[in-house]
Image (cartoon, rainbow, N blue to C red):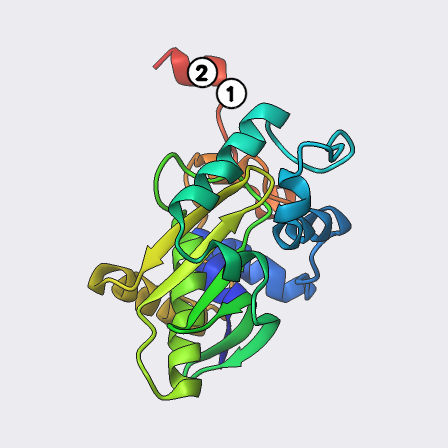
Amino acid sequence: MQAFTDLATAAYCPRKLYYRRLHDDFEPSENVASIRNLAFRYRELLDPRADLDAEPIATTLTSYRSNLGRVKARLDRWDELVDPPETRALLRGKDANGIAHKLLSNPSAPVIVSPGSPPNEGVWESHSVWATAAAKALSWEQGEMVETAYVEYPAYGVVRHVRMTTRRKAIYRKALRVAESVDGPPPRLRDDSRCEGCAYRGECGTKTRSLRSRLSL
């Protein structure tokens, strides 16, 4: 049985998963927790009288409220997203278990809350894997198909809809195989931007080129 976070990390970097397991390093930092907490305060954050200067938002006040306003206008499940029937739910599936930060109902859908930044479109592959794992586990528990999930980026006021496509499920199965097979350090990534902010970079030994060297190629 694999953890959702293991699968997401396997999709991001198998070697990082090895080091996380080696050090039993899975507790989120206090900063991560404070950012995720924003996802449960959207109505308060949208109030024009609210002072957001001390909040862990990663964009300007105008952009933040504009982003949240667009989500409210376009997402037909806004009310349920703001006030979900269940929060921080432990889901146990056939192959993986873990936390869905919110659960929506009618139809059922898990919600994953990321402390990071969103891509220009869609969601990052690691978040896609986590969302798919949560949807499949919820489907297993309820005995019915769960065809959709959501990923929130509350530091930016962005919410993305994730459909359970054939390609997305195939990426999930690949991450599952990788997570199951990691019993020693996998090969290093080669000069990848993912290495630059990795907490295990020194231990891993991966070297990255400077921006100047990249531009000189």
Which residue is more in the foreground, 13 or 151? 151
Disc 2 vs disc 1: Cβ atoms closer than 8 Å?
Answer: yes
| Left or right: 67, with 204 as reference point | left
Residue 116: x %, y % from top left: 56, 43
Mark 2 secondary-structure assignment: helix
Residue 75: x %, y % from top left: 40, 50
**Which corner quadrant holds the C terminus?**
top left
Mark 1 secondary-structure assignment: loop
Q: Residue 2, can we see it?
A: yes
Which residue matches tag 1? 210
Total marks shown come to: 2
| Left or right: 1, with 24 as reference point | left
In the depicted structure, whether residue 123 falls above or below residue 106: above
What residue lies at 43% left-to-right and 78% top-to-bottom?
137
Q: Amino acid at mark 2?
A: Ser
What residue lies at 60% left-to-right and 47% top-to-bottom?
115
What residue lies at 45% left-to-right and 70% top-to-bottom?
134
Q: Amino acid at mark 1?
A: Ser
Q: Residue 13, can we see it?
A: no
Which residue matches tag 2? 213
Which residue is more in the foreground, 144 or 187? 144
Residue 154: x %, y % from top left: 58, 45
Residue 97: x %, y % from top left: 51, 77
What residue lies at 70% left-to-right and 38% top-to-bottom?
56
